[in-house]
Image (cartoon, helix red, strand yellow):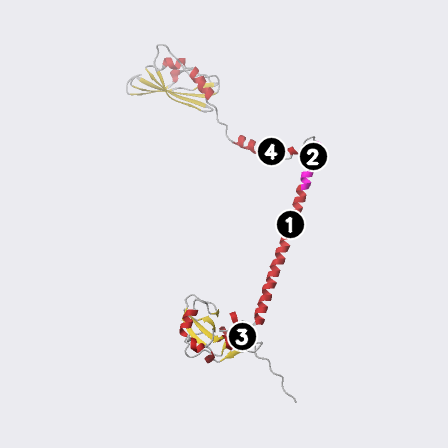
Amino acid sequence: MSGHPPSSPSPHQRWPADRFYWAVLEAPGWRRTGPLPEALRPDFEDLVPRAAAGAPLHAVCTPAADTRVVVCAVPMDALASLPVGVLRLSPESLPSCIDAAVHVDHLDLLVGDAEPAPIRRARLRRHLAAMALVLALASLAAIGLLRRAAHWTHAADLASAAAREALEGAGLDESHLDLAQRLAEARQFKTLTTSAPEQADAAGVLAEILALWPSVPGGPQAKPQSLAITDASITASVLIEGSPTPFLDAFAPPPGWALEEPRLSTQESFTRVSITLRRGDRERAPSSTGLLSRSGGHP
């Protein structure tokens, strides 16, 4: 008796459209093909009579050109009758009640809970291979970092040992191992102190000015108005009632300072004298050569 061996089923099965349950749902923003999302399942169940289904439905969807999705469903017990080796199941065509333009090959029913075991095992093997690769790369990176850390730890130990030997040779103990840090701190402090501009101490110059301030018995009364002292100059403004000559004749600059020509300005019976002293050895200019400006009455 001779016969032909049974042919193996095609891995891609196509069923007539009337074996499926169909629906078109509004789903703005949904752009994925696959199992029907749980948010759309209540709307789909409202359109499909439970009595007509008779068993739990396995539904998939694919987006249409507009804001809608086309849903295709089949009872789960119908999927259980598929021959072994079938990897895809899709409709032969769309029913006439569906007015959306979608491709039937996008409606693969063997996804999600109905995914064939060979495809699930293949995906699991791919995930395991990727995880093994990531683990191997992470292990290599960790080993490299550990070896580098061990190298630098060994180099630090050698440097510490060399420093201790140098200190022992100089008769010092290990408490001086931080000499480099202290030296760096000292250099930094020196840099900060040398770069900062020195502020002149005006206390000594002020004391000299006050000690040499003229006091003319029976002479005109001199009222200091302002006094400014810097590292290189002294500026004083004095208001004198009457003639300023006795005051200027009695004024003597401190040692190391030179008096410039005073500037005089008069108003009624008062004379304002502006005195400027600068560091140097110039002789005091005669007060008679001072500049005189007059406003109001006579000096």
Query: Could you tell which of marks 1 and 3 lies nearer the N-terminus?
Result: 3
Discs 3/2, front: 3
Q: Vertical placement of 240 versus 191: above or below?
A: above
What's the distance in space between the residues labelled 1 and 3, CA to CA?
Answer: 50 Å
Which of the marked residues, 2 or 1, is nearer the chain's N terminus? 1
N-terminal-most mark, 2 or 4? 2
Q: Is residue 216 above or below residue 130?
A: above
Label drawn at residue 88: 3
- Image mark for residue 166: 2
Q: Position of residue 126 (x, y in %)?
A: 59, 65
Front-lying residue, 158 or 59: 59
Badge 2 vs badge 4, beta-carbon distance below 8 Å: no
Question: Viewed as shown, does residue 131 lie left or right of 165?
Answer: left
Q: Residue 171 is drawn in which quadrant?
A: top right
Q: What amino acid is labelled 1 in the image?
A: Leu
Q: Residues within 10 Å of mark 4 (few under 14, many from 20)?
A: few
Residue 182 is tagged as 4
Taking 84 as reference, is 224 left or right?
Answer: left
The CA distance from mark 2 to mark 1 is 30 Å
Quarter the N terminus occupies: bottom right
Residue position for label 1: 146
